């Protein structure tokens, strides 16, 4: 039933007064049905300039080859793979939110899953462009696929983690896309039924003729549940396989059995940080404070704290194992992160990822929007440096000191990276302009049970444990979208 | 003879709509379908719908995907062109697990979703068959086939009593057709 009452000690997931089903639709569709404001245009202009830079830098790479990057004989893999792993990692939060949190029945996912999944898809697109552009001969990009060919057929090597990666990333991308789009159908139908003229025709095609009949919803829910069930191991497998690209090599610093869980935790960590970066701005600009509340922000900060601490434990384990292994090359690699010429990269990695996130233990910091926003960016800077340290710092001082070298990025390296951020934001801004950034149907589902007004009705009705009521009122004080004076007389 | 084809009871609240379904069923008025802006649990049982069998389809597609890629890997690396990699066996089952898993998931997702679209007649560009435009927004709509359910006024009253905010007598089945 839609109306069972939830315990008063749970914080509300929808705040505001007089929220009706119609108001949810109106609020969520405002940016879709009206011309965007100035903030959107400014953001879009900057982002699309970045995307143009990306097009130019990647075209330059295709034309002149990867010799235009700063790679050398010793460091043969640098910003390209760093950028790839960084983007794939960021692309992990969306499916975690939509799949794992669905299985755990975490209702707060309902208002953030849509934009997080969109973000996932855009991040994986950015990652995929790195894969193609770092091949050097992108017209042969089909070579990692098991296709019959005229060389024998000589087949791909299914023993290789790089081939597994092709399968993992392509499966992850397409399954995420299917999951996201299926979830969009009811909301696209809502836009269709409110629109007129050409808009109606476009959204009519996009909404696949959705009607919302009983049987459709029943099947829809089955599909979503099973997709969540299979996406959960999928999302864990993807970064596990990415980590095996490194872990199955014999390179000190890469050859580590802890890599799979460590990479998965790091991926969720950076993904949630990116969701936080985007949503804290989006909720303000689009006026969605009633749906993406302080509870959501704090819950995401808690996940950032948890995964950041798992990453911290993984770092410590790596150091201990390097010491305990007795292998001098292994020991040197880890010592080199602090005393080598890249000590500053090591400091950025450990400082941003472990030390800074520990601040999240304080509730004052978790519920402070500006600080949360800055910390979410710090996390992603730290996670970029983590990949840089693992990749470049492990490579740059190899077994033969005469071949030791430094890596200096060229303008092409820098432009591809900055451009990929522009590309990502261009896609994200287009998304919030043409598609509902909050899953309306799913938010409507929790309106009667978990909204502030429903809880207020419970309070007015009385018969509640006094301690619990005080606890609830106390928790509301941190919300920026709740008028706490309403509660003084209750 | 009335020209009404369908009677629609529009509810603003899902619980009142459930009450409406109960009222109609108590009075032996058959319900054609119910349209809601969000999934309402419990309607399918009230209307006597069977459980979805998509789970079985998903399982079959998963088995198909896993078998396909495992057979491909076997054919390519063991039968067609075995490679000597440090003298290790060509039929390296543990190495085939990641791809087998990925394709199991891939086939499950695509197979099940496409089956869902096929069974529910969803495809890009399908003309939407909408009985009321607000059913995807903020109205919970019970549709009753007017043919054979002659006492229209009685049905209207039943719906209103159950809490319908509006009762429509539509001459056309779908309002979305031009």
Image (cartoon, coloured by chain):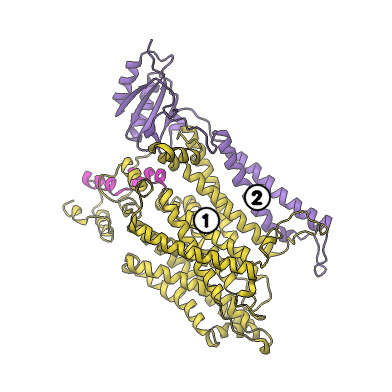
Chain colours: A yellow, B purple
In the depicted structure, whether residue A462 falls above or below residue A236: above
Residue furthest top as drawn: B1
Horizontal arrangement in the rendering, residue B2 relative to residue B50 (left or right): left
Of A239 and A331, the residue lying toward us: A239
Q: Which region of the structure is painted magenta?
A: A439-463
| Image quarter in which the N terminus of chain A is found | top left
Residue displayed at 41% across by 41% down = A191
- Residue, disc 1: A121
Residue A452 spot, x, y in % from top left: 28, 49
Residue B92 spot, x, y in % from top left: 76, 61
Please tell me whether the stretch drawn in magenta is mainly helix, strand or loop.
Answer: helix
Image quadrant in which you'd find residue A243: bottom right
Is residue A456 part of the magenta span, yes or no? Answer: yes
Whether labels 1 and 2 belong to a single chain: the reply is: no
As helix, strand or loop, the secondary structure at mark 1 comes to helix
Marks 1/2 in contact by CB < 8 Å: the verdict is no
In the depicted structure, whether residue A256 falls above or below residue A13: below
In the depicted structure, whether residue A224 falls above or below residue A117: above
- The chain holding disc 2 is B
Indicate which disc residue B146 carries: none
As helix, strand or loop, the secondary structure at mark 2 comes to helix
Residue displayed at 35% across by 26% down = B9
Image quadrant in which you'd find residue B143: top left
Nearer mark to the viewer, of 1 and 2: 1
- Residue, disc 2: B104
Residue A23 spot, x, y in % from top left: 31, 43
Residue A77 spot, x, y in % from top left: 63, 74
Residue B18 visible at all: yes
- The chain holding disc 1 is A
Of A245 and A119, the residue lying toward us: A119
């Amino acid at each position: 039933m839609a109306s069972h009452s939830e315990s008063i000690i749970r914080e509300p997931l929808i705040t505001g007064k007089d929220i009706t089903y119609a108001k949810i639709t109106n609020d969520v569709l405002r940016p879709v049905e009206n011309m965007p404001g100035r903030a959107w245009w400014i953001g879009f202009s900057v982002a699309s300039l970045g995307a143009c830079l990306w097009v130019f830098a990647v075209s330059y790479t295709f034309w002149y080859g990867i010799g235009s990057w700063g790679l050398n004989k010793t460091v043969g893999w640098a910003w390209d793979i760093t950028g790839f792993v960084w983007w794939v990692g960021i692309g992990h939060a969306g499916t975690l939110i939509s799949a794992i949190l669905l299985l755990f029945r975490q209702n707060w996912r309902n208002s953030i899953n849509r934009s997080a999944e969109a973000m996932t898809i855009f991040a994986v697109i950015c990652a995929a462009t790195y894969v193609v552009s770092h091949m050097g001969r992108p017209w042969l990009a089909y070579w990692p696929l098991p296709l019959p060919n005229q060389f024998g057929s000589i087949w791909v090597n299914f023993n290789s983690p790089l081939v597994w990666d092709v399968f993992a990333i392509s499966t992850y991308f397409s399954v995420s896309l299917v999951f996201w789009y299926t979830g969009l159908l009811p909301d696209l139908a809502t836009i269709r039924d409110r629109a007129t003229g050409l808009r109606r025709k476009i959204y009519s095609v996009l909404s696949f003729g959705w009607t919302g009949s009983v049987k459709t919803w029943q099947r829809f829910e089955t599909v979503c549940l099973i997709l969540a069930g299979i996406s959960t191991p999928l999302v864990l497998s993807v970064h596990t396989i990415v980590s095996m690209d490194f872990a199955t090599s014999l390179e000190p610093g890469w050859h580590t059995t802890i890599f799979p869980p460590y990479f998965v935790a790091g991926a969720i960590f950076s993904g949630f940080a990116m969701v936080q970066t985007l949503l804290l701005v989006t909720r303000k600009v689009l006026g969605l404070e009633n749906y993406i509340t302080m509870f959501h922000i704090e819950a995401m900060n808690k996940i950032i704290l948890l995964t950041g601490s798992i990453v911290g434990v993984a770092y410590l384990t790596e150091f201990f194992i390097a010491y305990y292994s007795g292998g001098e090359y292994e020991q040197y690699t880890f010592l080199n992160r602090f005393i080598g010429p890249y000590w500053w990269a090591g400091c950025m990695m450990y400082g941003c990822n472990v030390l800074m996130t520990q601040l999240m233990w304080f509730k004052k910091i978790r519920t402070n929007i500006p600080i949360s926003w800055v910390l979410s960016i710090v996390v992603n800077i730290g996670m970029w440096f983590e990949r840089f340290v693992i990749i470049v710092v492990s490579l740059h001082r190899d077994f033969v000191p005469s071949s030791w070298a430094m890596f200096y990025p060229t303008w092409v390296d820098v432009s591809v990276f900055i451009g990929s951020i522009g590309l990502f934001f261009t896609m994200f801004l287009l998304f919030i302009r043409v598609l509902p950034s909050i899953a309306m149907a799913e938010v409507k589902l929790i309106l009667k049970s978990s909204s502030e007004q429903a809880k207020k009705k419970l309070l007015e009705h009385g018969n509640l444990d006094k301690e619990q009521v005080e606890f609830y009122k106390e928790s509301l004080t941190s919300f920026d979208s709740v008028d706490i004076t309403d509660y003084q007389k209750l | 003879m009335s020209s009404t084809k369908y009677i629609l009871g529009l509810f603003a609240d899902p619980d009142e709509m459930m009450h409406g379904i109960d009222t109609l069923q108590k009075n032996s008025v058959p319900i054609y379908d119910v349209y809601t802006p969000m999934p309402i649990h419990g309607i399918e049982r009230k209307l006597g719908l069977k459980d979805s069998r998509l789970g079985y389809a998903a399982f079959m597609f998963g088995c198909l995907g896993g078998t396909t890629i495992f057979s491909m890997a076997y054919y390519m690396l063991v039968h067609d062109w075995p490679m000597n990699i440090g003298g290790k066996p060509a039929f390296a089952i543990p190495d085939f697990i990641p791809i087998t898993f990925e394709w199991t998931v891939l086939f499950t997702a695509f197979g099940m979703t496409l089956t869902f679209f096929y069974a529910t007649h969803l495809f890009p560009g399908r003309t939407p068959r909408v009985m009321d435009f607000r059913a995807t927004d903020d109205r919970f709509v019970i549709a009753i086939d007017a043919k054979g359910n002659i006492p229209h006024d009685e049905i209207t009253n039943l719906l209103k009593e159950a809490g319908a905010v509006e009762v429509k007598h539509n001459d056309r089945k779908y309002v979305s057709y031009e």
